[in-house]
Image: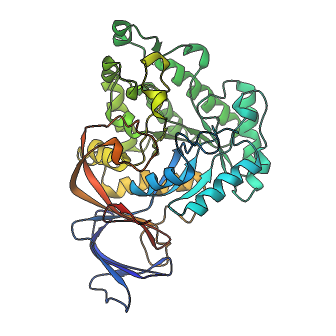
Amino acid sequence: MTAYLITGASIIGGEVADLLIDGGEIVAVGNGLARPDGAEVIDATGQIALPGLVDLHTHLREPGREDAETVLTGTRSAAMGGFTAVFAMANTDPVADTAGVVEQVWRLGREAGYADVYPIGAVTVGRQGTQLAELGAMADSAARVRVFSDDGDCVWDAALMRRALEYVKAFGGTIAQHAQEPRLTKGAQMNEGALSGVLGLTGWPSVAEESIIARDIMLNALVGSKLHICHLSTKGSVEIVRAAKKRGLEVTAEVTPHHLLLTEDLAASYNPVYKVNPPLRTQADVEAVREGLADGTIDIVATDHAPHPLEDKDCEWSAAAFGMTGLETALSVVQHAMIDTKLLTWAEVADRMSYRPAAIGQITEHGQPLAVGAPANLVLVDPAAERTVVPAETASLSRNTPFVGMTLPGRVTTTFLRGNPTVLDGKLTK
């Protein structure tokens, strides 16, 4: 394994120092480090060194929808975005509701070698919401699943949700809820409000999300387990989670990059690239989730990277699939929405996009400070660079990015996974 000397990097946006990587670990941090024989030098002057990013909410589509994404292409996209670990959602075909399927996904990630893949197991059999899946078997498998979600569908049955929370408590697992009351969103196409009426699109009320979050927080207060809220998107949801945390309840929450930046106004174009679940909300909601992320009410940023083949998006709005890609643009969007607005520091970005998601997912090899002895999972980003988003230039199989044509700040130049560069000079290494 080649040794690498990274010189002149700003460590998590602070002190400038050199980093020496050898044997898959960070072996030295300091100024003026000597170059060992055979080591390659990376000049990182003006760049920021961050721990490898961790995404708690990624759709890799394999098995079953390899026309949209595969574990290989999805992790290549992750590496380009600075991610060294991703958690793969269970809405595959077959559904990841057994030990066999989660182990398959985990092994595919290891074989690809671009980012570690940690499968999320389904809460219910087939994600049908009627019977608990093999939670214990998935937890005991080689994939060591600790997070379970029916994401894409809500576990709407309160009794079943309670049983799931009780079951995973035995081994310290987490239930990640897709908060969407289905009876309030039947046929919904976009955020409910004045604009949905003008556009003639069925509205998706905020209360459909907020009511499930409030219910599940109460259930978890009863059970004493671990609850995680996926893709929180409304001002009301932020307020509910904030109140729960003030009570000391064990609940965590995530927000997507697109909900930090984009609003429902984009639906006026009828361009299905802006159709997503939960829908883009109002400017007031955007400001609320930014504030929630800044003050720690919202624990993490998670991409909800949801690739779709062209035919599922290049059609009329009502027939189009919900979802957006996001792995390669996530850090730039966070820089634009949170760093450049002075709502977060780079150290806080490391917390929200590496340390905390790794802690929620209960992985120790990722989400570690850039210190001697830590695994060499890290990313270098040039904050002064700008780039215009061109879908054809992405590593993902799918092109449904909502940021097409936008000029975003920041550029990932280098990504290391266990001391091996997966991205150098902004390009994949293999």
Residue 343, position in %: x, y?
Answer: 28, 45
Quadrant where the C terminus sits is bottom left
Q: Tell me if residue 212 can be seen.
A: yes
Residue 185, position in %: x, y?
Answer: 54, 16
Give the quadrant of residue 148: top right
Which residue appears at 31% of the width and 90% of the height?
34
Residue 378, position in %: x, y?
Answer: 42, 66
Query: Is residue 283 depicted above or below 251 in this figure?
Result: above
Foreground pick, 97 / 401: 401
Which residue appears at 46% of the width and 44% of the height?
397
Which residue appears at 41% of the width and 35% of the height?
400
Colouring scheme applied when the structure was drawn: rainbow
Which residue appears at 60% of the width and 19% of the height?
182
Horizontally, residue 388 falls left or right of residue 177, namely left
Residue 289, position in %: x, y?
Answer: 38, 34
Foreground pick, 338 / 114: 114
Foreground pick, 115 / 10: 115
Horizontally, residue 319 falls left or right of residue 291, namely right
Query: Is residue 236 depicted above or below 104 in this figure?
Result: above
